[in-house]
Every structure is written in C-alpha cells, then in structure tokens.
Image (tube, helix red, strand yellow):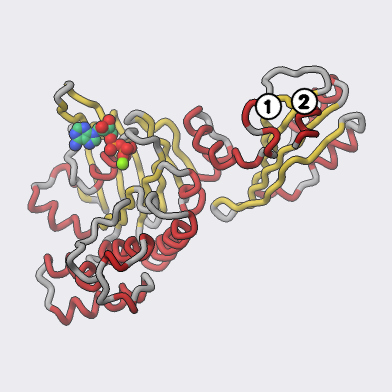
Amino acid sequence: MIKLSQIEKTYATPAGPLRALKGIDLNIKKGEIYGIIGLSGAGKSTLVRCINMLERPTRGKVFVDGRELTAMSDSELRSVRKDIGMIFQHFNLLSSATVYDNIAFPLRLAGKGEDAIRAKVIPLLKLVGLEAKAEQYPSQLSGGQKQRVGIARALASEPKVLLCDEATSALDPQTTRSILDLIKSINERLHLTVVVITHEMQVIKDICDKVAVLDGGVITEQGTVLDVFTNPQKDITKEFISVLLSNELPVAFRGGLVEKEYSEGAYLLLRLTFIGESADEPVLAGMIRKFPEVECTMLFGQLDQISGQPFGRMIVGLTGPQQQIDMALGYLAAQELREEVIGYVRRHGAAAG
Ligand SMILES: Nc1ncnc2c1ncn2[C@@H]1O[C@H](COP(=O)(O)OP(=O)(O)O)[C@@H](O)[C@H]1O
Ligand SMILES: [Mg+2]
C-alpha cells in the first residue's frame, strides 16, 4: 500500500544542508499497522510528511496504492491526498468551529452538499464516540476527545491510509490506551492501513504489527514487533525496549546497585524471555532439578502478549558455585528462550530491598 524507495530529504538551513532522511526504503502492506519509532530529531515527521508529500523528498520515490506520488504535479497530489488521512500530536483543530464543523471541514473543502456532509459526519461522530459533543467547541473537550475529533476528520474523506504523527504523545496513559484501541478497531473495521509515528515503545507494542527504528535519518532495524521486541539487534532499539522493561527490576536493584563484574556472594541477575509456545514450558523447573546447588530466586515475572503471541518475561537471581552457574546458563541457552545477564548484585543489596 505504501512503498518508499531510497527516500532522501535534505533541508537547506542557514547552517548549510541538513540531511534529515538518508535513503529510506519501506514497504507497508495493506491493512498493516506499521510503527516508526525514533528519538526526537530522528526524522520521523519528515518521513511521514514525505508519505503524503506535504514535504517533497529530495530524491527517491513514494508510491501509495500503486501510484507514484513523486511523479505527480501539485494539483494531482491534491486529489490523491484524500486517500491519506493524518492526525497530529496537537490535534490541529479549528478552535472557532464546532466538533461537527471540524469533521465536516474536509468535506466542505471538497465541495460536498450539506446533506451528504451530514450523512457522513453523523456516523463518524458515532464511530469515535462523540455524538453528544457535536455542537461543542474544541476548548470544551478533553485531549482524548480532541484527538477523537481529529480521527473523525481524518476519516471523513474515506482515506486508505491513516498517518498518525505522535498522535498520543500529548495524552495521559489511559487516554492513550483508549485512542490506540480506537485506531486499532478502525484499522480492523475499515481495513485501513495505519502508519504510527512515535517515540514510545509502549505504543508500538500495544497496536503495531511491524516496526521500523529510525535513527539519524536511517532505518536501523525493522521487522515484526514480536521479532524486534524479543530480539533487538541495535543499541538504540534495546534502549527503547529497556524503557518498558526497566520497571521490572525490584526497587533495590535499580540504579547503581547492579555491577558488571562478579564479586563474592553476589547474585547473577538474569532476564529470561519466553516467546510463543515456550512461554508455558517448565524450563526453570528443569534447571533447578539439574543443578540443585544453584539457588534460584524469582525477582520478577510477567506474562504479556505481543501481536497475539504469549510473551513471558522473568528476572531471576542465581547464586551457587560458579561452575554450576555456568552450566546452568549453558542449559538455559540450549532451551527455547532468550536469556540475558543483567549483571551482579550483592546479597545485602537484595536484603535491603
Ligand atoms: N522545515 C525544516 N527545515 C529545516 N530543518 C528541518 C525542517 N524540518 C525538520 N528539520 C530538521 O530535520 C531533522 C528531523 O526532524 P523531524 O523530522 O521533525 O524529526 P522527528 O519528528 O523525528 O523529531 C531535525 O534535525 C530537524 O531539525
Ligand atoms: Mg516529529
């Protein structure tokens, strides 16, 4: 549905040319929810604005639904842009227009009659749960309600693609959840292809099928959310994921207490990740039976889901004879799970927690 081929974007700035995108290749299939995650300044907004050609790429080609947008004139682009809806971090609503009129806006621009507009707007109000708010103004709405108006307005022209640029970044976690649920249900009901731009891994984990990590104008990693999440390759990806996982460590172990090197009597902290089928296998019980001298303390455990697959995470602390611990690690390495040594923590550190 969306294909980007070797997209480059260079801005002319007073300080000289700024290469915001450096050769982006991306292929997004119809009906997918595709996440693009990156730090501030990575080029996310530039990328999403190249998809709808609000920004013309300096080089490369953009295809949406089989048509090459980079080959079109501005007037041709105006007509294909109705296939591409967009929602923004700060909603971009007209403050002097009611909810109804905000949603009607693109339809009026397109020259639709008032009856046709009403027939379109009323179901959209229902879809986003704002029937009761039709005559209110944006200033009378909560952030979540404003974004619902933004979504309804984006859907008014029946787009095939919905671009979301940090659409939940100004919202609290609960409201974020409800907006993400709405986007997901729209994706399913209308078979809409959705591109989600965010700096938050939680957003990617909650609704995306695929993810690309954008860093300094380059895609450094991409794949299914399950693969990238459970087996990140690049440091920046690990960093994004660690933000989600950092709360796993018991309080006493967070911060400076975890050491890189073993010292006498320290626990080895091990993060275990179980994916899919292996999430129900008694791997730990097997290890404990095989290596009875290794003492294994469970510090954290959670069973979660990513893209419908069971996904378990666990942190355990191991102590015992070094050689036995090494063998236990070897045993775990041979099982269907991922294990990662976080570091070492001294017993009294544990006791203090
Ligand atoms: N219109 C512009 N003119 C000049 N530089 C820009 C412009 N838009 C963005 N940039 C620069 O391009 C880089 C990428 O910006 P942006 O795409 O907004 O990143 P993100 O959305 O990931 O924060 C940044 O260094 C930013 O300063
Ligand atoms: Mg941005």
- Callout 1 crowding tier (Cα within 10 Å): few <14, some 14–19, many ≥20: some
Q: Is residue 62 left or right of residue 283?
A: left
Disc 2, ligand 1: is the CB inside 8 Å? Answer: no
Front one among 353 and 197: 353
Image marks 2 and 1: residues in contact by CB distance under 8 Å: yes
Residue that carries the numbered disc 1 in the rendered image:
257
Which amino acid, by three-letter code, is at mark 2? Answer: Arg
Q: Which residue lies at the image location 80% right of the left edge and 30% below the top edge?
A: 318
The picture quadrant where one finds residue 246 is top right
Front one among 38 and 253: 253
**Which quadrant holds the C terminus?**
top right
Compared to residue 19, the image places residue 69 above or below, namely: below
The picture quadrant where one finds residue 213 is top left
- Callout 2 crowding tier (Cα within 10 Å): few <14, some 14–19, many ≥20: some
Q: Earlier in the sequence, mark 2 or mark 1?
A: 1
Asked whether residue 60 is in view, the answer is no
Q: Position of residue 192 (x, y in %)?
A: 35, 60
Q: Position of residue 134 (x, y in %)?
A: 28, 76
Q: CA distance from mark 2 to mark 1?
A: 8 Å
In the image, farthest residue toward the bottom: 115
Secondary structure at numbered mark 2: strand
In the image, farthest residue toward the front: 352
Q: Which residue lies at the image location 26% right of the left edge and 65% below the top edge?
A: 153
Q: Position of residue 138 (x, y in %)?
A: 27, 65
Asked whether residue 122 is in view, the answer is yes
Disc 1, ligand 1: is the CB inside 8 Å? Answer: no
Compared to residue 274, the image places residue 16 above or below, namely: above
Secondary structure at numbered mark 1: helix
Q: Quadrant of ligand 1?
A: top left
Residue that carries the numbered disc 2 in the rendered image:
346
Front one among 17 and 249: 249
The picture quadrant where one finds residue 325 is top right
